Amino acid sequence: MWTILRKDLLLEFRTREALSALVVLMLLVLLTFTFAFDPSGAREAAPAVLWVTFIFAGLLSVQRTFLLERENGSWYGLLLTPIDRGAIFIAKMLGNLIVLALAQCVLLLLLMLFLGVPFPAAPGSLLIVNVLGLIGFSALATLFAALSVRLRAREMLLPLLVLPLLVPLVICAVEATRIVLAGGDLASTGPWLRVLVSFDVIFTVAGWMLFEQLVQE
């Protein structure tokens, strides 16, 4: 598992294709929101802008999770490696998680720059909310990226499959982020965090258990 993760990260940081495209797309979407919102209400909309921008841009990066192996003809070689198939899913998910975490750090800085969002009074609470949201998104998107990699219309089908299931995560992440940016502590985000943790556990375990069946069909 760690070898696959190391290979994916080395390839990404050597080319920086996904990360660069991700940052550029987030910048364009954020600029669109900046001109669309009234300056007086931009700060109130910042949590929604943060997660909507991240979700749409993140889907672009996650699509490449299995696509490189598929295009280079190494997909079946990866499946023939003598390790548990679930470990391949976990390695791919962790690789996506690291790349998306770096991109979200850049997005937070851009949000403060363009929308005038102040630095949070409790950065640790914001970090926990973001990490929980990232884990859930990475688990769900990685699972469906494996399902759609062999389809011709995968660029269209992946968002259609993932976005409806992401609704609980987006709602909870936006509300928890809003509370933290407004100066609230982690305890005040309790109900939203519990849903995020449940979402993360469900889809991480489901991905680990279902990945072998998905790649066999």
Image: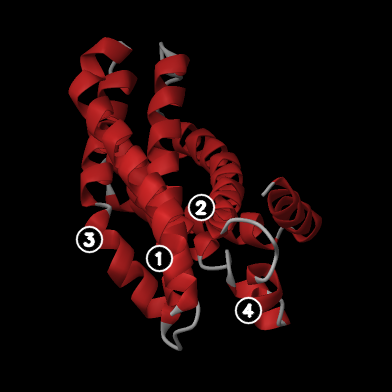
List the residue tagged with mark 1. Answer: 144
Q: At which x and y percent is residue 163?
A: 28, 61
Identity of the residue drawn at 65% across and 75% down: 75
Numbered disc 4: secondary structure:
helix
Gap between marks 4 and 1 measured at Cα:
15 Å
Of labels 2 and 4, the one closer to you: 4
Q: Amino acid at mark 1?
A: Phe
Identity of the residue drawn at 46% across and 31% down: 112
User: Residue 70: which disc?
Assistant: 4
Of labels 3 and 1, the one closer to you: 1
List the residue tagged with mark 2. Answer: 27
Q: Amino acid at mark 4?
A: Arg
Gap between marks 3 and 2 measured at Cα:
24 Å
Gap between marks 2 and 4 measured at Cα:
29 Å
* Crowd tier of the residue under label 2, counting other residues whose Cα lies within 10 Å: few below 14, some 14–19, many 20 or above: some
**Quick one: label 2 or label 4, which is nearer the N terminus?**
2
Q: Tell me if label 3 and label 2 are in contact, CB under 8 Å.
A: no
List the residue tagged with mark 3. Answer: 164
Position of residue 158 relative to residue 139, above or below, is below
Q: Amino acid at mark 3?
A: Pro
**Quick one: label 2 or label 1, which is nearer the N terminus?**
2
Task: Report whether residue 30 is seen.
Answer: no
Numbered disc 1: secondary structure:
helix
Numbered disc 3: secondary structure:
helix
